Amino acid sequence: MRHLQLFALLLFFPLSAFGQAKMPRVQIVFLIPADVYVPAGVSERMTQTADYTEAMLVKWMKLWDYPPQRERIFQRKADGSVKILFVKAKETLASGKFPLKGGNLARKGKLLAKEKYKVSPNLDVWWVWIYVGDPPIRYSSYSGSGSAGVGGLSQVNYTNLPGTISVQDKLANSLLTDLKFKGTIHEFGHALGLPHNGPLEKRDLGMPLMGATITNYRRTMKNQEQRGFVSEASAAILWKHPLFTGTARQRYMIPKVQWHEMILNSDAKKRVAHLTGRITSNIPAHSVIVYDTASDVRTQYFQKPYVARIKKDGTFDITISEPVGVKATGVLKVLACCENGTMTGDGKGRGLPSAYEMKYRTTRTGYQLIK
């Protein structure tokens, strides 16, 4: 699930390059090779997928006390079905020039759709589905990247299998597993600006949407989990995304955040740690997220996310409830979620790469910062 790098240059464009901020839209694209036909039932299946995605994100945003002002983020027709932009590539599958893996088909689908449907430039969130035929043939390169400020782009395979998707389904039931459904919404999550995160195991909520694949999660955790959830950190990031607020005010601006009085204390007896500090920013921040990444954390798909609301005076206190083991080294990646939808740690960039980093080592007495 690699990230696309299509948005890096946008981070350095001046605000004047964009003009007045515009509301992003979700654009669903269905891309096929020239010699492949759209299978029956696509509109129904895609509408079920949109319904499930909205329901899942909204459910957990509300549960974590980050209720969205807008709950319907997909463009729909009068009958409630989602709007789909159907496009066909010039290359045929038979020629071997239409790739089954790799290649930037998300960008191809986006450009074809913009041309065919006269989509106005708006830094939208694009969810590009590629269909190359029924199983076992499939397009295998899933990816996604984006942010509230610059829009997003993701690419996934459309798997044509019989069955109905209900919003009540567990994320890893047999049908949704066969459809690679978790990975499909996972990549859309990246297009919304969500980084990877693992579970906080004491909460016992199942598989995080932005975590490992079903196979890798089950292998690592040694279970047959079917439940899926959206982490508190992901909910905090999504809360002020224009798609969920209905306003694009200051959307393009990167808040100038600064961190003050950052202190990390450990309580060895209770096996917890506390990160306290204060934040100032020219655009208010509502929450602080800390991703704990350490040498004994398996991969970024299992990095532990911690969240705290920011008080009126700018102070915060984050409890690290599942600290890593003794004799480990790691990094606390600290980020602010701001009122315009941007997540930043250094006030210069967006997302996890911009995090304010605090290196540490662990001993029997807990975390110790490395200067």
Image (spheres, rainbow, N blue to C red):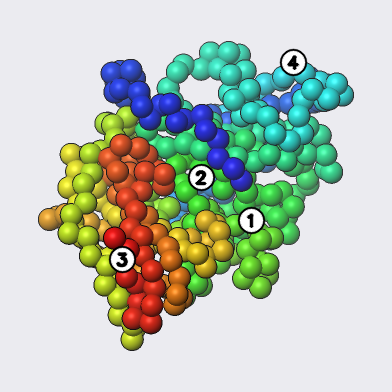
Please report contact status of discs 1 and 4: CB closer than 8 Å, yes or no. no
Nearest to the eye among marks 2 and 3: give it.
Answer: 3
| Mark 2 nearby-residue class (10 Å; few <14, some 14–19, many ≥20) | many
Q: Report the residue at 33% width, 40% height from top.
A: 342
In the depicted structure, whether residue 152 falls above or below residue 180: above
Nearest to the eye among marks 3 and 1: give it.
Answer: 3
Q: Report the residue at 22% width, 60% height from top.
A: 262
Residue designated by label 1: 213
Calculate the distance from the C-alpha at mark 4 to the C-alpha at mark 3. Answer: 56 Å
| Mark 4 nearby-residue class (10 Å; few <14, some 14–19, many ≥20) | few
**Upstream in the sequence, badge 4 or badge 3?**
4
Amino acid type, mark 1: Thr
Determine the secondary structure under disc 4.
loop
Residue designated by label 2: 189
Determine the secondary structure under disc 1.
loop
User: Which residue is the extreme one toward the front?
Assistant: 371
What numbered label is drawn on residue 369?
3
Nearest to the eye among marks 4 and 3: give it.
Answer: 3
Q: Report the residue at 30% width, 76% height from top.
A: 266
**Percent x, y for residue 261?**
17, 59
Amino acid type, mark 3: Leu
**Upstream in the sequence, badge 2 or badge 4?**
4
User: Residue 18, located in which quarter of the rendered image?
Assistant: top left
**Percent x, y for residue 354?**
37, 43
Determine the secondary structure under disc 2.
helix
Residue designated by label 4: 90
